[in-house]
Amino acid sequence: MTQQTVATAADFHEQVSQIVIEELELEEGELTDNGHFIDDYDSDSLSLITVVSRIEKELGVVIPKTELGELVNLRLLVDAVAQHAAESVNG
């Protein structure tokens, strides 16, 4: 029996943060876990789609488009990445 390593939200935090910072054109240190992408960072739905597309391309984690409306801050986005990464590993 082999032991599989399941990635946690902490494992994805830095990578997802960097993608969000680049796509929303934020300064280092400006992004917080609970800052609202639209209200606090003047993002829009197109920017969030771009963020999710980069996550899919760079991290290999697919997040269903139906969940985009719920992913309003970094914490929720990172949690979703970890959840869907685990689902893809577990089948």
Image: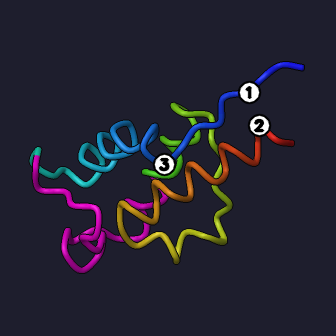
Disc 1 or 3, which lies upstream in sequence?
Answer: 1
* Label 1 close to label 2 by CB (< 8 Å): yes
Q: Quadrant of the C terminus?
A: top right
Disc 3 or 2, which lies upstream in sequence?
Answer: 3
Q: Is residue 65 above or below residue 13?
A: below
Q: Is residue 21 above or below residue 65?
A: above
Image-based side of 22 in relation to 78, left or right:
left
Q: Position of residue 47 (x, y in %)?
A: 37, 59
Quarter assignment of residue 40: bottom left
Question: Mark 2 = which residue?
Answer: 89
- Magenta span contains residue 45: yes
User: Furthest-top residue in view?
Assistant: 2
Question: Mark 1 = which residue?
Answer: 4
Task: Residue type at mark 1: give it.
Answer: Gln
Q: Helix, strand, or loop for circle 1? A: loop
Q: Helix, strand, or loop for circle 3? A: helix
Q: Position of residue 79 (x, y in %)?
A: 51, 58
Task: Residue type at mark 3: give it.
Answer: Ala
Q: Helix, strand, or loop for circle 2? A: helix
Disc 1 or 2, which lies upstream in sequence?
Answer: 1
Question: Mark 3 = which residue?
Answer: 9
Image-based side of 51 in relation to 85, left or right:
left
Task: Residue type at mark 2: give it.
Answer: Val
Q: Is residue 20 above or below residue 70?
A: above
The residue at the point 42 percent across, 70 percent down is: 45
Q: Position of residue 72 (x, y in %)?
A: 40, 73
The part of the chain drawn in magenta is 29-50
